[in-house]
Image: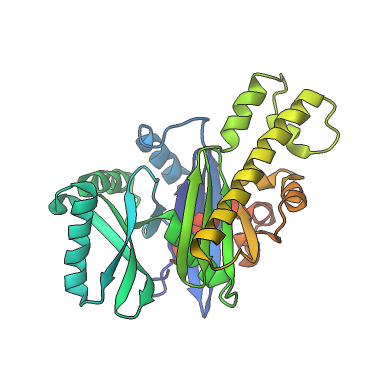
Amino acid sequence: MTLFGKSITGIDVGTKTVKIANCIKQGSSYKVLKAHKIDLPEDLNLDSNLDYIIETIRRSCEVSKIPLNNVALVASESWYQSFSVTLPDMPKKELKNALLFEIKRYSGLNISDVTFDYYLNNSLKDKNEYLVYFAEKERIKVIIDKFKSHKINIKYIDVRDLIALALYVEIYADDKQIKCFFDLGYSDFKVIFTKENRFMFSRTISHGVKSIYEILRNTVTEENLLELFMFKGLENELIEKILRDYFYEIFNELLRTIKFFAATYRLGEPSNIIYTGGIFAIPGVHRYFCQNIPYPCILNNVLDILNYHDKELRDIGFMFNYAVGAAIR
């Protein structure tokens, strides 16, 4: 997103790292002006350590000369709730009132205490399907004020579902097929299905990389556990079995989710699976997915697609999808 030629800085605070991307629109495309990654202490809770994380972001961006006057923040999923609703076609003012009524019915919250956003996901003759995202107004105000106290100006807070959709619409504009977006994170993994500019379905499963780290820590003494994911030359049969059992479960959950989507929505299976997540920076992991998942595999390296100048970050550009997506949405 660009406001009168100004750049937007997208910030995605993950469990292990903060990804930051400063972007600007150039013609019909976008350019990443600067990107930056900040490593966080392990198992740092976002909500209870927000002041520390914000100040870390501010200092790091000051050194990297990344502007923080127009910031799009990726929302933590603990900050908001969501649902879909189909309503008759109506004027915008009436629609907002109708959505507030649905929020009250869904959550029991007083409508004066919520802030919300919505997305027109599908139109069916005289009816429309909306995706509704809402949060307690006071909680969001506290978050924005905390950032502001550290001289970070939050223009808007966005949700991962719509960020992923916007990014796909922008990057894969000519692809009219169903796409499956797979994000394997540290604490969980998320599967999102889209078709053109329509968000179809998502599923979050609490079985991220953290679970296999914890198992390995109780099994091996190696300091650098990442080296165990190389998928070649593993001499310890127990370690190899632990790794392969873990990924076998990931593969099964992914394939089960795809089958559920195809049977429920009756639109066929995805034309490909688009992968993102820091684990794919480890040599051998992407290849291992390609060998075991019967769909074309695309590593969604947004920094490479947008031709970011820094090769070191471009090599791990698939970690920056949400940060870039928030900035261009």
Q: Is residue 301 above or below residue 277?
A: below
> What residue is drawn where x is 39% and y is 46%?
77
> What residue is drawn where x is 72% and y is 56%?
294
Question: Which percent across, then down, holds residue 253?
Answer: 59, 45
The image quadrant of residue 1 is bottom left
Q: Is residue 266 above or below residue 284?
A: below
The image quadrant of residue 118 is bottom left
Q: Is residue 5 above or below residue 294?
A: below
Most foreground residue, 10 or 201: 201
Most foreground residue, 186 or 33: 186
In this rendering, position of residue 217 left or right of residue 36: right
Question: Which percent across, then down, holds residue 143?
Answer: 29, 45
In this rendering, position of residue 285 left or right of residue 24: right
Q: Is residue 10 above or below residue 1?
A: above
> What residue is drawn where x is 55% and y is 51%?
36
The image quadrant of residue 51 is top left
**Can see residue 153?**
no
